[in-house]
Amino acid sequence: MTEYEVTYILRPSLEESEVEQRATTIGEIVKNQGGEVTNLEQLGKKRLAYEIDDAREGYYVVMQFKSEAAASKELERQLKLHEDVLRGLVVRLDAKMQTHMATLAAGAPPPAPS
């Protein structure tokens, strides 16, 4: 399985409990496709760089997961169809990025670029 990270922005009109429900629902999409959610982080409501569908802010959610390529494609498709998702971006995490994230999680300073 490959590791991925998805960042998506939910409509600002949602309540906090609704944001949690939407995040859980989106995580279930991955699980139903045979994937595994490894980390889910809600970053809260933030101002957008530009207006999207008459919204100037939105709830940011970052989710890391392991799955096959087909499951990540299905997640992308579902995010585009979901009415509460303003934007979404799925990226594959390579070994270098995983090492960097583990270093940051451990609290150690990142290595100097070579």
Image (spheres, grey):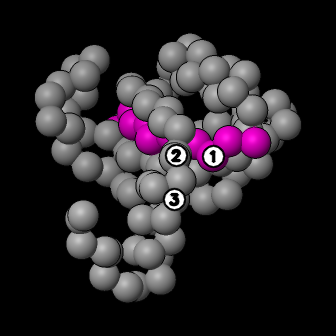
Residue 23 in view in this figure: no
Does the magenta segment cover residue 27? no
The reply to whether discs 1 and 3 touch (Cβ–Cβ < 8 Å) is yes
- Figure quadrant of the N terminus: top right
Asked if the residue under mark 2 is in contact with the one under mark 3, i.e. CB atoms within 8 Å, the reply is yes
Relative side of 49 to 104, left or right: left
Count residues near mark 3 (Cα–Cα under 10 Å), then give few for <14, some for 14-19, many for 20+: few
Amino acid marked by disc 2? Leu
Q: Is residue 31 left or right of residue 66?
A: right
The residue indicated by pointer 3 is 98
Magenta stretch, main secondary structure, is: strand
Q: Which residue is mark 2?
A: 93
User: In the rendered structure, does residue 9 fall within the stretch colored magenta?
Assistant: yes
Q: Secondary structure at mark 1?
A: strand
Q: Is residue 34 above or below residue 15?
A: above
- The reply to whether discs 2 and 1 touch (Cβ–Cβ < 8 Å) is yes
Point out residue 95 in the picture as x, y percentages from the top left corner: 53, 53
Asked if residue 87 can be seen in this view, the reply is yes
Q: How far across and how far down the image is residue 31, in percent? A: 80, 40
* Measured Cα–Cα span from mark 3 to mark 2: 6 Å
Q: Report the span colored magenta.
A: 1-12
Q: Which residue is mark 1?
A: 3
Residue that appears at 44% across and 41% down: 7
Q: Label 2 vs label 1: CA separation? A: 6 Å
